[in-house]
């Protein structure tokens, strides 16, 4: 069986790593890895391949940045040639980035079977580009591999046939569990034992100057009580520079370049609180038991709230300050590990893929 994996952006890499490894342990499987090049900076891409032990891509499409239409179209044009040439039996796509939906559209039109890892998540907010990507990908995929139970309800509501849905658990947590022993703190001179880890990159937070300015002011206020480590995504860096914003408490706020996986994991484990708009960090903090305040009005990962340590604060900065205060006074939210976030999701995926007669997968919903 020839399995082809498609990845393109940072959050895909920690998902493909354990799945590729699980298939390597099986007999009779040939694997190909395609990197679309949506993320191309060394610290958004190469470092993850190194740290996560992902083999070098067999094919690099090198699409780079662009508007959503340009990026999606470039992946489609280049990836179609790859599929025609390699003729995989099953294509695995991951998460909700533009590369995911682009590869899915190509395969659906060529009649190549698709399995979606992390299917069924919904924020119910169609202003998020990722929500559009999720909706389209799940309508077209043949095998839907879901990380949490509510995803099945979402998919059934959209008319997806029940037999296509498989509850496998969360592959991000497979990676977290296997690499936690190697997590290592980055060298940040002046950083003490207590700190907040902050990441922000959603267009809804960083592309609107007023919102970004309010968030940055609030971080300055928080930093008077708690040091802040802020790895800055390229999109966010450009927007902060565009505002001409300078942090006042530069000895309390450490704005650093994007970090590797092992460094980010160590920071999340040791942080007093994580303030973020990332989907992955909401999940990782739940797995680690670290309080997480999510600067979004909604989340496609509600299990991190019902089971985990996550609290939505939206862009209400008063609420953010209140919640940080609660955590500092020892009243932070506890949590428990969601079902099947047990480190074995990738093995379940391999079982399902190899136990399926791909040629018999139906195209019908
Ligand atoms: C993408 C995903 C988002 C994911 C995020 C993680 C989509 C729609 N969004 O958002 O779901 O949470 O990745 O980081 O797919 N840039 C660089 N270097 C790079 C890549 C990008 O400098 O290696 C800059 C470019 O200016 C680019 C901007 O970052 O225009 C945004 O990159 P893009 O891939 O469009 O989306 P992200 O915001 O990274």
Image: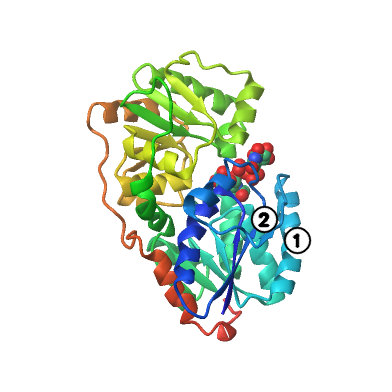
| Residue at 65% across, 45% down | 40
**As rendered, which of 65 and 13 lies closer to the eye?**
13
Mark carried by residue 282: none
Q: Is residue 128 visible?
A: no
Q: Secondary structure at mark 2?
A: loop
Q: Is residue 265 left or right of residue 277?
A: left
What quarter of the picture does the N terminus occupy? bottom right
- Mark 1 nearby-residue class (10 Å; few <14, some 14–19, many ≥20): some
Quadrant of the rendered image holding ligand 1: top right
| Residue at 38% across, 43% down | 183
Q: Is residue 336 left or right of residue 250?
A: left
Q: Which residue does the numbered mark 1 point to in the structure image?
A: 78
**As rendered, which of 347 and 205 lies closer to the eye?**
347
Q: Which residue does the numbered mark 2 point to in the structure image?
A: 36
- In the picture, residue 72 is in which quadrant? bottom right
What quarter of the picture does the C terminus occupy? bottom right
Looking at marks 2 and 1 on the same chain, the residue that comes earlier in the sequence is marked by: 2
Q: Position of residue 187 (x, y in %)?
A: 43, 29
Work out whether 246 lies above or below 360. Answer: above
**As rendered, which of 262 and 69 lies closer to the eye?**
262
Q: Position of residue 87 (x, y in %)?
A: 68, 76
Q: Position of residue 335 (x, y in %)?
A: 26, 47
| Residue at 33% across, 30% down | 323
């Amino acid at each position: 069986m020839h399995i082809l994996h498609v990845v393109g952006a940072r959050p895909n890499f920690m998902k493909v790593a354990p799945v590729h490894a699980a298939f390597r342990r099986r007999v009779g499987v040939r694997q190909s890895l395609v990197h679309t090049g949506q993320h191309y900076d060394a610290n958004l891409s190469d470092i993850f391949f190194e740290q996560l032990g992902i083999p070098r891509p067999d094919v690099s499409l090198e699409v780079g940045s662009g508007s959503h239409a340009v990026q999606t179209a470039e992946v489609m044009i280049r990836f179609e040639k790859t599929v025609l040439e390699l003729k995989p039996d099953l294509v695995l796509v991951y998460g909700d980035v533009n590369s995911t939906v682009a590869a899915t559209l190509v395969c659906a039109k060529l009649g190549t079977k698709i399995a979606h890892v992390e299917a069924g998540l919904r924020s119910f907010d169609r202003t998020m580009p990722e929500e559009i990507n999720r909706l389209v990908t799940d309508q077209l995929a043949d095998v839907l591999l879901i990380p949490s139970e509510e995803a099945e309800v979402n998919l059934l509501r959209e008319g997806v046939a029940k037999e296509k849905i498989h509850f496998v658990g969360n592959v991000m947590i497979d990676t977290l569990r296997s690499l936690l022993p190697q997590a290592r703190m980055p060298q940040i001179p002046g950083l003490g034992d207590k700190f907040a880890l902050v990441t922000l990159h959603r267009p809804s937070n960083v592309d609107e100057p007023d919102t970004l300015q309010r968030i940055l002011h609030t971080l300055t206020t928080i930093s008077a009580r708690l040091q802040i480590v802020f790895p800055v995504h390229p999109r966010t860096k450009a927007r902060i520079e565009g505002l001409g914003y300078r942090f006042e408490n530069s000895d309390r706020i450490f704005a650093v370049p994007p970090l590797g996986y092992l460094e980010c994991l160590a920071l999340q484990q040791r942080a007093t609180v994580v303030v973020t708009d990332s989907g992955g960090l909401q999940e990782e903090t739940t797995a680690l038991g670290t309080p997480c305040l999510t600067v979004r009005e909604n989340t496609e990962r509600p299990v991190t709230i019902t089971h985990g340590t996550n609290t939505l604060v939206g862009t209400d900065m008063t609420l953010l300050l209140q919640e940080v205060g609660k955590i500092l006074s020892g009243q932070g939210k506890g949590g428990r590990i969601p079902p099947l976030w047990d480190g074995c999701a990738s093995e379940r995926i391999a079982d399902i893929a190899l136990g399926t007669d791909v040629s018999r997968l139906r195209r019908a919903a």
